[in-house]
Amino acid sequence: MKGCFIMISRTNVERLLLIIVGSFILAFSMYNFYYLNNITEGGVLGILLLLKNLFNIKPSIANIIIDYSLFALGYKFFGKKFFISSIIASACFSVFYSLFESIGPILPAQHNLLISTILAGTTVGIGAGLVVRAGCAAGGDDALALIISKHTRLTLGSVYMIADCSILLLSLLYLSGMDVLYSVIAVTISGRVIDLIYRGGSFADPKPVAGA
């Protein structure tokens, strides 16, 4: 019994560390690579950047409102552990992003947008991948995508693609066509990296569990 308790506790600690580290990397990348270089993302991350650039709404605040609403909507499909872990991940991201905003740019100005795009996609992929590997969602859009996929004929990949393309098109309101093109590259890279990290193993299956 004692050995089982220690194992469970260790697993929870490791999961929490993945969530914290992943959220830290995600927030660092969103501010230092995406926001400062006019690169955008799909899903909730893209909405946060859209709100920041068009209405100067702080991502740290908007993230909590949007994510918590979507997590509440998907609660019955995901189960308690997934729900709580995702709330923690969202809160950590908001805290870390607010911290980076107060600190200001950390990295030297990068004048090669292609390099910035590659770094942006890679680091966001690593951050989000670690959070997903911990068995929760990096953003509320993951919960919403699963719900839509469950109640329509659309595959999960199709839902993500439609959502990402919609956000990127809206991003033309404050970005040039070339900036959006680079954003597409970043989204493609981050998706690949997330997939690679998730396939490396996870603490819990993040698929929805009815009635959990």
Image: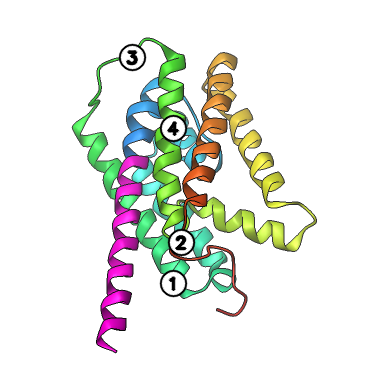
> Is residue 109 on the magenta stretch?
no
Q: CA distance from mark 2 to mark 4?
A: 20 Å
The kind of residue tagged 3 is Gln
Whether tag 2 and tag 1 are in contact, CB under 8 A, the answer is: yes
Q: Nearer the viewer, mark 2 or mark 3?
A: 2
Image-based side of 195 in relation to 34, left or right: right
Q: Earlier in the sequence, mark 4 or mark 3?
A: 3
* Magenta residues, dominant SS class: helix
Residue receiving disc 4: 122
Task: Say which residue appears at 40% left-offset and 26% top-offset.
Answer: 119
The residue tagged 2 is 135
Q: Residue 81's mark?
A: 1
Q: Amino acid at mark 4?
A: Thr
Q: Quadrant of the N terminus?
A: bottom left
- Residue 74 picture location, percent across and down: 57, 65
Cβ atoms under marks 2 and 3 closer than 8 Å: no
Mark 2 surroundings: few (<14), some (14-19) or many (≥20) residues within 10 A: many
Residue wearing tag 3: 110
Residue range (magenta):
1-26
Label 2 or label 3, whichever comes before in sequence order:
3
Measured as percent of width and height from the top left, residue 147 is found at 65, 61
Looking at the picture, how far across and down is residue 97, in whole percent?
Answer: 30, 41
In the rendered image of this protein, does residue 69 appear above or below residue 94? below
Distance, label 1 to label 3, CA atoms, is 40 Å
Compared with 208, 19 (above or below) is above
